[in-house]
């Protein structure tokens, strides 16, 4: 009996170790370094992490990715925030990075009304929130939209994006990770799916491909899968001319598209970045669960009640990225 108990305990410990998103022996391979000693390499995507949330830390984590945002036109995809909200990423935090790559802030108009539903209103919101102080702002569907293919989608065959997105050579996806009323949470995948979709494209995603004019009432999983499919279309279009940074501060259960979001009930976590958006969003979800802050229960309830993790499951299934990753601290 004693030997059996020891065996079961060891088996349980092994299962816990391998189940964690950033640890998998199956993804490691041995190699030799220049000294001839054997080292461990991993083919899992890297997610870089810093506890600091400052302009300097944002620059540092961008540089850690090792992919330079270059080209004649560099897009910075960031939410300009619905008027009335206060949790969006502030220009004072992101300004140094935006200026260093000579970026243009890109957005598309909303499909739910509000004060960013037209280009005129959207530009006013961006100006009022200080974004024009750090860069030009392009509302990309001002002159219409264009379709890009969705490869391997169940619900979408084409993603409708703001027409002007085709003008950009590189995209820095700068996302505020937080909760979301419909998606459970919003991070990199939401930012490039709903965020880069035109007004019509947003309706197409929310209706799970059924309409460009009526949101309808699709199954929750179908909506989440459509969001993942639209994001994959953008990622495929960009290829290696895109990178992803998530800032985990002001962790409200509500999105920056909400004009009256709930106040955050858990502490800030840090900044995470990756070249794999699935790994990045999964790492942020894991950070919420791993937090010692009791206030996390509210964000966890929002994520679980909307089955938010299904977005990442589907994104992985259609080949957008991996939910397994290697976490690399830059502190």
Image (cartoon, rainbow, N blue to C red):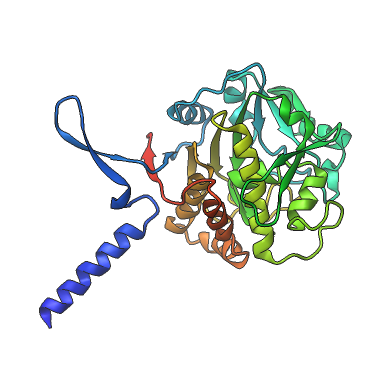
- Residue reaching furthest to the top: 72
Residue 198 location in percent, x, y?
A: 79, 41
Q: Residue at x 65, y 42 (%)?
A: 233
Residue 219 location in percent, x, y?
A: 70, 67
Q: Is residue 7 above or below residue 81?
A: below
Is residue 193 at all visible to an observer of this figure?
A: yes
Q: Quadrant of residue 19?
A: bottom left
Identify which residue, 114 or 35, lies in the foreground: 35
Q: Is residue 4 above or below residue 249?
A: below
Quarter of the image containing the C terminus? top left
Q: Residue at x 67, y 47 (%)?
A: 230
Is residue 253 at all visible to an observer of this figure?
A: no
Identify which residue, 279 or 233, lies in the foreground: 233
Q: Is residue 255 above or below residue 137?
A: below
Residue 202 location in percent, x, y?
A: 77, 48
Q: Quadrant of residue 231?
A: top right
Q: Quadrant of residue 78?
A: top right
Identify which residue, 189 or 304, lies in the foreground: 189
Residue 250 location in percent, x, y?
A: 59, 47
In-image side of 17 versus 219 (left or right): left
- Residue reaching furthest to the bottom: 1
Q: Is residue 307 above or below residue 26?
A: below
């Amino acid at each position: 009996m004693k030997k059996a108990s020891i065996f079961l305990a060891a088996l349980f410990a092994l299962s816990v170790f391998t189940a964690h998103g950033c640890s998998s022996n199956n993804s490691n391979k041995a190699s030799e370094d220049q000294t001839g000693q054997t080292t461990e390499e991993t083919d899992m995507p890297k997610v870089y992490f810093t506890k600091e949330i400052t302009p300097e830390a944002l620059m540092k984590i961008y540089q850690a990715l090792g992919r330079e945002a270059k080209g004649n036109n560099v897009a910075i995809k960031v939410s300009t925030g619905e008027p009335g909200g206060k949790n969006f990423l502030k220009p004072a935090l992101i300004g140094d990075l935006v200026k260093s790559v000579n970026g243009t802030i890109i957005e598309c108009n909303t499909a739910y009304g509000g004060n960013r539903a037209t280009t005129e209103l959207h530009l006013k919101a961006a100006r009022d929130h200080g974004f024009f102080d750090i860069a030009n702002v392009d509302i990309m569907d001002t002159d219409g939209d264009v379709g890009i293919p969705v490869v391997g989608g169940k619900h979408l065959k084409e993603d409708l994006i703001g027409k002007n997105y085709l003008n950009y050579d590189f995209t820095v996806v700068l996302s505020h990770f937080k909760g979301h009323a419909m998606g459970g949470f919003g991070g990199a995948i939401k930012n490039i799916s709903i965020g880069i979709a035109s007004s019509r494209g947003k309706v197409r995603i929310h209706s799970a491909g059924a309409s460009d004019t009526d949101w309808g009432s699709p199954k929750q999983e179908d909506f989440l899968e459509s969001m993942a499919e639209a994001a994959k279309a953008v990622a495929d279009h960009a290829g290696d001319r895109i990178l992803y940074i998530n800032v985990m501060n002001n962790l409200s259960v509500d999105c920056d598209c909400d004009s009256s979001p709930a106040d955050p009930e858990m502490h800030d976590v840090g900044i995470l970045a990756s070249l794999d958006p699935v790994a990045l969003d999964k790492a942020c979800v894991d950070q919420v669960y791993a937090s010692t802050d009791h206030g996390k229960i509210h964000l966890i309830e929002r994520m679980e009640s909307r089955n938010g993790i299904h977005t990442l499951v589907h994104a992985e299934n259609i080949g957008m990225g991996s939910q397994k990753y290697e976490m690399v601290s830059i502190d």
